[in-house]
Image (tube, rainbow, N blue to C red):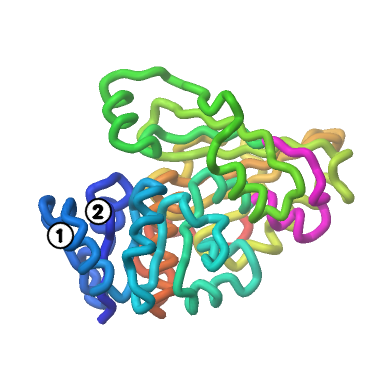
Amino acid sequence: MTAVFIDGAAGTTGLEIHARLAGRTDLELIDLDEARRRDPAARREALNDADIALLCLPDEAAREAATLAGPRTRLLDASSAHRTAEGWTYGFPELEPGRAGEIEDARRVSNPGCYPTGFLALVRPLVRAGLLPADALVSVNATSGYSGGGKAMIAEFAGGGPAFRPYALALGHKHVGEMTRHAGLAHPPVFQPAVAHVFRGMVVEVPLHAAQLTGPVAALADVLADVYGGSPAIRVRTDAPTTVAVEDDADTDRMTLHAFASADGRQARLVATLDNLGKGAAGAAVQNLNLMTGVDPLTGLRLPPDACGAAA
């Protein structure tokens, strides 16, 4: 049985991960009461008693926790502290050929961010295939449910809050470096995040001109369908629905990808929907933990009955 400690189990992501793992018979959860969670010695002991420690902490606290854990303990970091750090495996199993196997063997795994998960799922296959040049100048528009902002934002929006609020207007969002590196881009994308008055869900969009591509706009959907066609957690829709909503994949661990094109083939609009706390956080962490412990990667994931990985 694998001993697991969630450092930061009282936060939004930590609470959801704990709830998902609590009934597992293949795992032994190391729990600390509130007083011991605040005791550095107790945290250090729990980190080193664990076979795998999940870090659901602010970035600086996650970096500190990584130094407290000894070499025996494997780490899965849900913060953004180590997503571009050397020696850490980027925990997006579907992103690269062989990545799931790398996660299985890794000592240090960094869980992807919610916005980068949608962006990278759309863009990385295109860059790898050469359809989108690595030096392309791209932008990404994304809107998340307010649960992604943590306890303070949840309290704000639960009591009212705006219907829609753009943020990171100074273009310095911490996810940009993660997006750039793992997409294989030469230039950072222009990232335009926003929060909507819905609790869960996310929509991520990447607009493209045909002039940016080395092939036809129609090839975008083909590349995505080829890469993700066998994935139970990532669906590629080729039926061009007339509407897409931020809540489309809320309360699931599935992500849905679309490649819309203008009638004249001159423009495209790539769209991903996912749950910011599902495939964008806790669901991804559970999937990575499953890989690290050698069980079925889909154990404990919330996938719709029609999830099969095939293009719709």
Residue highlighted by disc 2: 9
Crowd tier of the residue under label 2, counting other residues whose Cα lies within 10 Å: few below 14, some 14–19, many 20 or above: many
Question: Residue 266 placed where, x, y %?
Answer: 85, 35
Question: Residue 245 placed where, x, y %?
Answer: 51, 34
**Could you tell me which secondary element the residue under label 1 belongs to?**
loop
Query: In the rendered view, would you say 82 is above or below 98?
Result: above
Do labels 2 and 1 touch, CB within 8 Å?
yes
Crowd tier of the residue under label 1, counting other residues whose Cα lies within 10 Å: few below 14, some 14–19, many 20 or above: some
Residue at point 38%, 72% (across, down): 74
Q: Nearer the viewer, residue 283 or 230?
A: 283
* Alpha-carbon span between mark 2 and mark 1: 9 Å
Q: Which image quarter is the N terminus in?
A: bottom left
Residue at point 50%, 72% (across, down): 103
Question: Residue 11 placed where, x, y %?
Answer: 27, 46
Magenta segment: 122-139
**Could you tell me which secondary element the residue under label 2 belongs to?**
loop
- Residue 304 vs residue 11: left or right? right
Residue highlighted by disc 1: 32
Q: Amino acid at mark 2?
A: Ala
Residue 132 appears anywhere in the view? no
Q: Amino acid at mark 1?
A: Leu
- Residue 187 vs residue 33: left or right? right
Residue 149 is labelled as none
Question: Residue 129 placed where, x, y %?
Answer: 79, 60
- Residue 145 vs residue 241: left or right? left
Q: Which image quarter is the C terminus in?
A: bottom right
Examine the image and state in which quarter residue 72 appears: bottom left
